[in-house]
């Protein structure tokens, strides 16, 4: 962790809601007048789209799914967090999605990566959104560098429903192919993704209020109004104003001393109310740290 160069990370699998959470953070940064270095976990994948397809054709599914650490440049991600925490800079790149018009117009092919290069100078903080922002393993400890680690995860049956519906309707895959992908990636999900949610400061877990006991039979994703969001705070967080949150979020209630439950349709509001004071606290520590460093330098 670094008071002068703070890092905020959102961790969770694709389709879990990390992108939506990233958009909420972007709005909060803009409202606070903060310049954030925005980094996506996709840019640290080891293989581009064509390489992944070749691995799939060979049946090398162990490293093919992006959950596996071996399928990602986790060493480079850890180096980025370390360097940013110490210097306010670091090396990153971007993955070129099909909808990234700016990168495509600049000559980059969809499904590939831009060259590695430095982050923009003079940023207020680093924001990461991806699969491995809270990894702790024998070889890596990325969580130790993060000032605010947020987990976004639906219960597993809902996550499977979201993946099946998305991949069949938006990406043209068959249900059988998607189900096979889920089975092949399950071990890596349990080994590398699930443990991160014990490292987080806050978890947002969406829980449906409709029957999802057979996720493979669903043709639609349960709506936000058909769910609750369970918000778990790390017990060491003593400055959470639960009475204020209960007053501001209609239908919210406490299920445990450190757990708030809100209606699914109120998730965005809950995130803004919860995260805004935490961002303000992080930036206040940054300003005080910078003032102390300047005071020492003047001496």
Image (tube, rainbow, N blue to C red):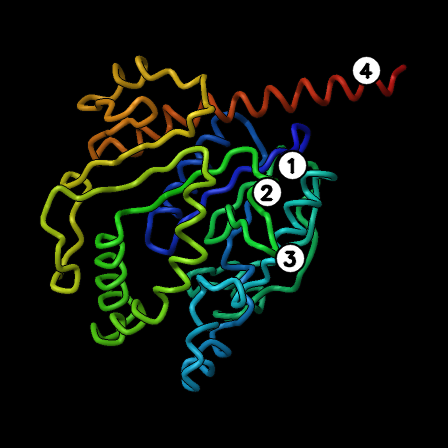
Left or right, 240 with reference to 292: left
Element type where label 3 sits in the image:
helix
As drawn, which residue projects farthest toward the right?
299
Mark 2–mark 1 contact, CB under 8 Å?
Answer: yes
Q: Point out the tag, 3 or 2, that comes first from the N-terminus.
A: 2
Q: Point out the tag, 4 or 3, that comes first from the N-terminus.
A: 3
Q: Label 2 vs label 1: CA separation? A: 6 Å
The quarter of the picture where the N terminus appears is top right
Mark 3–mark 2 contact, CB under 8 Å?
Answer: no
Element type where label 2 sits in the image:
strand
Q: Which residue is mark 4?
A: 295
Disc 3 versus disc 2: nearer the observer: 3
* Label 4: few (<14), some (14–19) or many (≥20) C-alpha neighbours in 10 Å: few
The correct choice, above or below, for 241 with respect to 62 in the image is: above
Mark 3–mark 1 contact, CB under 8 Å?
Answer: no
Q: Which residue is mark 3?
A: 76
Q: Label 4 vs label 3: CA separation? A: 34 Å
Left or right, 26 with reference to 226: right
Q: Label 3 vs label 1: CA separation? A: 20 Å
């Amino acid at each position: 962790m670094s008071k002068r160069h703070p890092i905020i990370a959102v961790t969770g699998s694709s389709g879990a809601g990390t992108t939506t959470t990233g958009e909420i953070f972007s709005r909060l940064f803009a409202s606070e007048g903060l310049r954030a270095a925005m980094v996506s976990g996709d840019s640290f994948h080891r293989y581009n789209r064509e390489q992944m397809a070749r691995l799939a054709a060979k049946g090398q599914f162990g490293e093919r799914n992006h959950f596996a650490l071996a399928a990602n440049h986790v060493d480079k991600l850890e180096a980025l967090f370390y360097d940013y925490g110490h210097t306010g800079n670091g090396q990153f790149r971007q993955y070129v999605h099909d909808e990234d018009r700016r990168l495509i117009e600049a000559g980059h092919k969809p499904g590939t990566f831009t060259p590695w290069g430095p982050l923009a100078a003079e940023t207020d903080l680093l924001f990461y959104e991806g699969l491995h922002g809270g990894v702790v393993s024998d070889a890596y400890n990325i969580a130790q560098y993060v000032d605010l680690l947020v987990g976004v995860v639906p219960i597993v049956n809902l996550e499977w429903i979201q993946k099946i519906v998305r991949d069949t309707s938006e990406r043209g895959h068959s249900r059988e192919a998607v189900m096979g992908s889920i089975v092949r990636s399950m071990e890596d999900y349990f080994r590398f993704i699930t443990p991160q949610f014990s490292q987080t400061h806050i978890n947002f877990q969406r829980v449906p209020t409709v029957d999802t006991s057979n996720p493979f039979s669903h043709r639609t994703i349960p709506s936000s109004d058909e769910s609750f969001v369970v918000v778990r705070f790390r017990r060491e967080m003593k400055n959470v104003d639960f009475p204020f949150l209960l007053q501001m979020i209609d239908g919210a209630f406490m299920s445990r001393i450190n757990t708030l439950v809100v209606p699914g349709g109120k998730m965005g509001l809950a995130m803004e109310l919860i995260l805004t004071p935490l961002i303000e606290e992080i930036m206040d520590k940054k300003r005080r740290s910078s003032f102390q460093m300047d005071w020492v330098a003047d001496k």
